[in-house]
Amino acid sequence: MAKSRIQFICQNCGSVHQRWAGKCDACGEWNTLVEEGTSGGIGSGPANTRNARKGRPVVLTSLSGDIEDAPRIVSGIGELDRATGGGFVRGSALLVGGDPGIGKSTLLTQAAAALAAKGHRIVYVSGEEAVAQIRLRAQRLGVAGAPVELAAETNVEDILATIADGKRPDLVILDSIQTLWTDMADSAPGTVTQVRAAAQAMIRYAKSTGAAIVLVGHVTKEGQIAGPRVVEHMVDAVLYFEGEGGHHYRILRTVKNRFGPTDEIGVFEMSDKGLREVANPSELFLGERHAKSPGAAVFAGMEGTRPVLVEIQALVAPSTLGTPRRAVVGWDGARLSMILAVLEAHCGVRFGTHDVYLNVAGGYRISEPAADLAVAAALVSSLTGLALPADCVYFGEISLSGAVRPVAHAQQRLKEAEKLGFGSAVLPLGSEELAGGNGVGGIGADTFQPTELADLVARIAGSRRSRADEQE
């Protein structure tokens, strides 16, 4: 019998090392190598090659054929169903990640209670809390009467044996994957080997029985789900539960979904009674807006299939430093530097002696480049001290040449703006939805479509002259 070798596995990236070292050569992290045997898990070979069976042929088929829609379990919580693409898919595995205390267990408890009230068999297994703690949360949420089956267990084999009794469960919630351990691996719970082996066992159960599995994952300091990234590749969908500590809203963001759209979001509001879904997030992000303040522009953005209006705030102030500050909250700092460079190079707007601060109101985070035009308008407005029109929305991408480029879904952005009472818009020329001149209500007739960023700067600066003429 071959002697089992000892290997050292990085708990951050999962790379295998033959010797211990203080620093992982693959990811550069310190003190992440843990000694693990090769009898199972990453880097291990077959347990007994003598008894290995021969492979059996499988049936090959063609690309054409009947297609069946994935059967789903609808929870009735609209924002959760939106983020998952229409509900939990039977036989799928879903990974939910988020910061500690963000509300992952609260959301899943509410979802479990809503599904159990519809007659589904729901099993909630916690590896971090006792059953009494889960009952206290259910009482606070007002769902203690829901027929959800609870258990506090961390061993995968015991969990599988428990849920195998009786009727097949429709949904199994495991909180969290980092606390599970299996007899097939010799390492400690939370290590790469245990997390991967436990996830494999639960996903295998989901695929073979048709039960939906929800795995809760911890996140690292960088905001990514802890453990090997291979777990994210193994599951069918990955959701991130996001939110700022100083704000009462939470965003459930889809980053992967094999059965639905990605980049979809569900918006919730945290209260003492749990999470309340927000059907119109634009009103939430614009609720405390000061319309006459310079440096504020309303951006019409898209999150998946949902248009969202959010206020972008800019403050340009004279600097006493040799190198002025550039601070960004909720947007990409490198993209802000690009917009400032374009304004200086092609529009003659100087920021070299000014500090620039940019903030997305409500703690919201923007990732799409369509916010370029709104950011540029807010910066010029703050520098000149001129407030932008209160009923105007902005969206469009800016190139390094100073040109304003079209973005997708212009019609949906304008419809959302009109619904919230906005009467005008600044958008790129040549948007495919408006190419035929089809506007949306009053907005379509009152749109400004600049081809160059300098046209927008001239329009904002021209408002100062028109105001001076009115005063005279």
Image: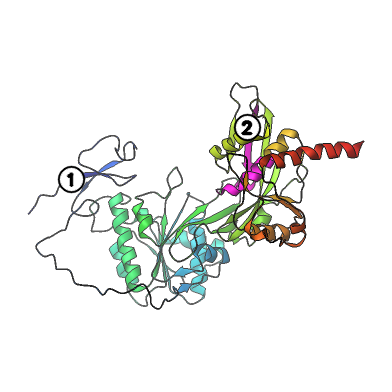
Question: Which residue is more in the foreground, 257 or 407?
Answer: 407
**Dot 1 crowding, Cα within 10 Å, few <14, some 14–19, many 20+:** some
Residue holding disc 1 = 6
Quadrant, the N terminus? bottom left
Viewer-side label of 1, 2: 2
Whichever of callouts 1 and 2 sits on the residue coming sooner in the sequence is: 1
Counting from the top left corner in percent of width and height, residue 255 is at 47, 56
**Dot 2 crowding, Cα within 10 Å, few <14, some 14–19, many 20+:** some
- Which range is magenta? 354-378
Residue holding disc 2 = 345
Residue 437 as seen in the image, left or right of residue 338: right
Residue 239 as seen in the image, left or right of residue 1: right
- The residue under label 1 is which amino acid type? Ile
Q: Is residue 333 above or below residue 415?
A: above
Counting from the top left corner in percent of width and height, residue 218 is at 42, 51
For residue 368: magenta? yes
Q: Find out whether the residues at labels 1 and 2 contact each other: C-beta distance under 8 Å.
A: no
Counting from the top left corner in percent of width and height, residue 181 is at 30, 56
What residue is shown at x 27% (from left), y 58% (from top)?
182
Q: Which mark is residue 209?
A: none
